[in-house]
Image (tube, helix red, strand yellow):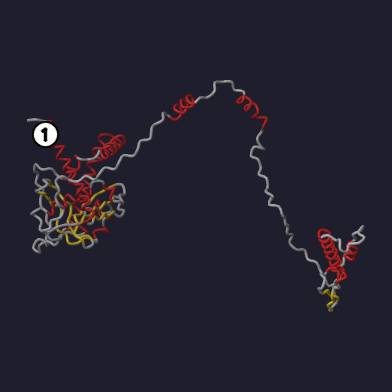
Amino acid sequence: MLGLRCLGAWPGSWGKRGNDKVPVPRSCWRPRFLAKRCGISGIQNLKGSLSCKLLRKVKKKMMMKAFQTICKQLRSSKSFTVRQGTFVDFSTSSYSYVRKKKNPYEDVDQAKYSRLVKSVLSFGGLAQTPESLLEEDALLYGPVTKHKPPKPKEEAKVPQNWFPLFNTERSEKPNKRDSSIPLKIPLQRKAIPSVTRVLQQTMTSEQIFFLERWKKRMILELGEDGFAEYTSNNFLQGKQFHEALESILSPQGNLKERDGNLQCGYIESVRHILKDISGVLALESAVQHETLKYVGLLDCVAEYQGKLCVIDWKTSEKPKPFIRNTYDNPLQVVAYMGAINHDANYSFQVQCGLIVVAYKDGSPAHPHFMDTELCSQYWIKWLLRLEEYAEKEMSQTIQKPD
């Protein structure tokens, strides 16, 4: 077993020799004994004159000797083995070693670019001035334009001649005697404008620009005659599509009576929507608003998913998944709706609208449902377009005197 000498213990503590505890005598801590054990020479009489500083030095050296003695005895012990542990470095300095980053310019060939550096530094031309810098910037990037503050938002326009969209004196359900056969009132050509004409004459400058650009692009691609043929074909396909839908939705028609040319086209595109349509009340029927003075020819009035709607069928070559992609079609729907609600030929009232965009390749059509609140918003826009049309017609009448 490992035995400890009394030199490594504090006065009054217990050393260990074998299995027996041995008290450490206090004489071991006398100055002369400490000096002798620690190998301090040149000290004659330390009793009463040993300073605190020297005492600390003696204690430190004595502890180091005690530690060395313990290590020697541990090495000589057969039952003792030493395992290599993890090296831990303690530092009292706040400096931490950081690996120096490599300079990216070390690999640059300095001799190759020395001539360029000398030529730049030895340039004897005119010094750059703020004016010359501005001239160079204007030449490279164009003249400086002042920032324009954003325009204040215009207040929402309110129609001067307000007229309600809905008729409080009517109900949504038609008379029983009129609901068996869908109405189909022929359109009579009168002096009052149609819904289509009002919308065409009051198009915004942006709409006109995009329409004219599309026409020019199509003419460049197809030529004058090719574009005229393209337009007539689109009109014919739209007419056939409406006739096929009329035969399907009428009480005497069915899906087998549709046109064979449209079997895999527009009709296939609206097949999933036709399943949700029932209770057809009008097909290709004319409407007239006596107070606001306009007429129109609506496509269909029927129930869509249990709600009575004015349905407008549209064809398109490009997908239109959002109602904003339909441009003025919502205004057309609410115009028909307002006319129906105040036309004496109809005994019912409509409060919702539906725009169905069908595709020639047979891909599923996009239905755009318009609830009562949305229809009311578009009704205000329609009234403003009517007033704009009336102002244009009046100005043209003044410019062309009799």
> Residue 110 placed where, x, y %?
67, 32
Judged left or right of residue 72, residue 193 is left
> Residue 63 placed where, x, y %?
82, 64
Give the tally of numbered discs.
1
> Residue 372 placed where, x, y %?
21, 56
Query: At 14% from the left edge and 50% from the top edge, which residue is drawn?
Result: 163
Q: Looking at the figure, which quarter contains the N terminus? A: bottom right
> Residue 137 placed where, x, y %?
46, 28
The residue nearer to you, when weighing 130 against 181, is 130
The residue nearer to you, when weighing 237 against 369, is 369
Residue 235 vs 270, above or below: the answer is above
Judged left or right of residue 159, residue 368 is right
The residue nearer to you, when weighing 354 against 26, is 26
Q: Which residue is mark 1?
A: 397
Q: For residue 159, what is the image quadrant?
A: top left
Residue 219 vs 338, above or below: the answer is above
Disc 1 residue type?
Thr
Q: For residue 26, what is the image quadrant?
A: bottom right
